Image (spheres, helix red, strand yellow):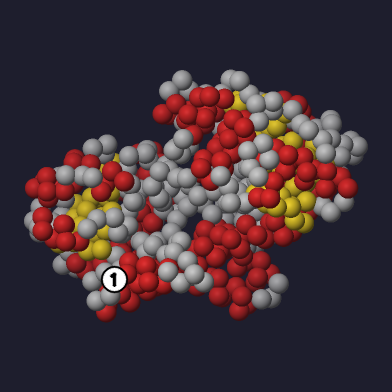
Amino acid sequence: MKKINKICCIGAGYVGGPTMAVIAKNCPEIDVTVVDINQKRIDLWNHDNLDLLPVYEPGLKEIVDETRGKNLFFSTEVDKAIDEAEMIFISVNTPTKTYGKGKGLAADLKYIELCARNIAKVAKTDKIVVEKSTLPVRTAEAIKSILDNTGKGVKFEILSNPEFLAEGTAVEDLLNADRVLIGGDETKSGQDAKDTLSWVYEHWLPKERVLQTNVWSSELSKLVANAFLAQRVSSINSISALCEKTDANVAEVSRAIGFDSRIGSKFLNSSVGFGGSCFQKDILNLVYIAKSYGLTEVADYWEQVIIMNDYQKRRFADNIISTLYNTVSGKKICFYGWAFKKDTNDTRESAAIYVADALLDEQAQIVVYDPKVSEETIYADLDYLGTRSPEENRKLLKVVKDPKEACKDAHAIAILTEWDEFKNYDWPALFELMLKPAFVFDGRRILEKEKMDSIGFKYYKIGQS
């Protein structure tokens, strides 16, 4: 097994930044360089004010403060970092395709291919290349084909090392991972490469938690793990709709079935729907793979998880409209939360985007407050949908930095992210600021119905009549 001194990570986003920071903290003898072509993002990683880091994760800024400039570096000098590194992590975006074959289902691998071609162009010494992005099965084969045909005599070993991070707890998930999965070729050189990456993780994790597989199993495991978790969310959300019609409480149902040791309690919390960069993308990828192999029933089965998630978001928006006397035109609706979950500033596939889009179609006036998401990001999320012009989005939706300002003279509050601070607000004071009757639609089930009713709110909690 070869020990290494220099690691490069291409991509300074939600996976690359935290992962490399934790590696740098636990491997002080390894220089870790994170590179990205986005100058603004790199400038923020290097900013003196650690509160401005482009990725918000509890505990991250403390680790960056401890390691940055010592053995953790952020740079736009991609070629230099590739040339010097012995191990290269690829952690770039792999969005769902919006064009051509596989549109709406398959992962768009253009950024991965560009990385591979750049590594092939620059590398003059042997490298271990690690897939860290979420990728479809057999992507490693394509990367290997590109790298092995450079004609320079450089040898590459390709490893799959999928991330299993939950945003909001990413640092803790890295420091105390349930497992680390490393897939690679079952050749001597492939085994040596797997052992080298395993050695990196074994600086802080027990060896038994570092699992080695062949590369195909590793790639597929990532998709399947997220699909199974998302399936549980959609399953309990389907029951939440039934609970609202039958005077049942989805929290009580969830608690009861969670005590079954065969089921367990995790991922049984009903909400307005799952979001984030992985669940929907990975399931759609799984659907595309199944369809490409003619497994129509398999594809239909997993596609239903997405359909149920979309239904939950649509149902939440429809309930706001019908409760507000079948019209929200010109009515001020306060959104508490835009991030897809608490303790992150990531908004990818956030339920808030789609609930807002549905209400804006009805000419609602939406005011958004989120403690970590920027105004620029919120407008970019809406503009990306292409439902209406950017000018119209800015006319109908405003972003504020004060939760009281957000709800002043509002007809309703919709809770779209489970930020802890929302639980501790002075809700009687907020009630006085709103128009009456004052409605609260709790899409994250974070408030107590009895308390909200006693204040005077017309309170609606998803999964409970």
Q: Position of residue 116 (x, y in %)?
A: 74, 42
Q: Foreground residue, 1 or 89? A: 1
Q: Residue at x 60, y 49 (%)?
A: 163
Q: Nearer the viewer, residue 201 or 140?
A: 201
Label 1 neighbour load within 10 Å: few <14, some 14-19, many 20+: some
Instruction: Tell how many labels.
Output: 1
Position of residue 452 in the picture relative to residue 162 (left or right): left
Q: Residue at x 61, y 75 (%)?
A: 298
Using residue 68 as the reference point, say whether residue 161 is left or right of it.
right
Can I make out residue 71 in this image? yes
Side (left or right) of 341 relative to 216: left
| Residue type indicated by callout 1 | Asn
Image spot of residue 211 (x, y percent): 70, 52
Residue in view at x 23 percent, y 71 percent: 465
Q: Does 415 appear above or below 126?
A: below
Describe residue 94's horizontal placement relative to residue 464 as left or right.
right
Give the residue displayed 47% in from the left and 52% down from the top.
276
Residue 387: name its quadrant: bottom left
The vertical placement of 179 against 297, above or below, is: above
Q: Would you say residue 309 is visible in this rendering?
A: no
What percent of the width, then of the height, locates residue 390? 37, 46
Q: Nearer the viewer, residue 170 or 262?
A: 262
Residue at which label 1 appears: 249
Quadrant for residue 441, please give it.
bottom left
Helix, strand or loop at label 1? It is loop
x, y percentage for residue 306? Answer: 48, 67
Q: Is residue 109 above or below residue 463?
A: above
Classify 296 as above or below 56. Answer: below
Viewport quadrant of the N terminus: top right
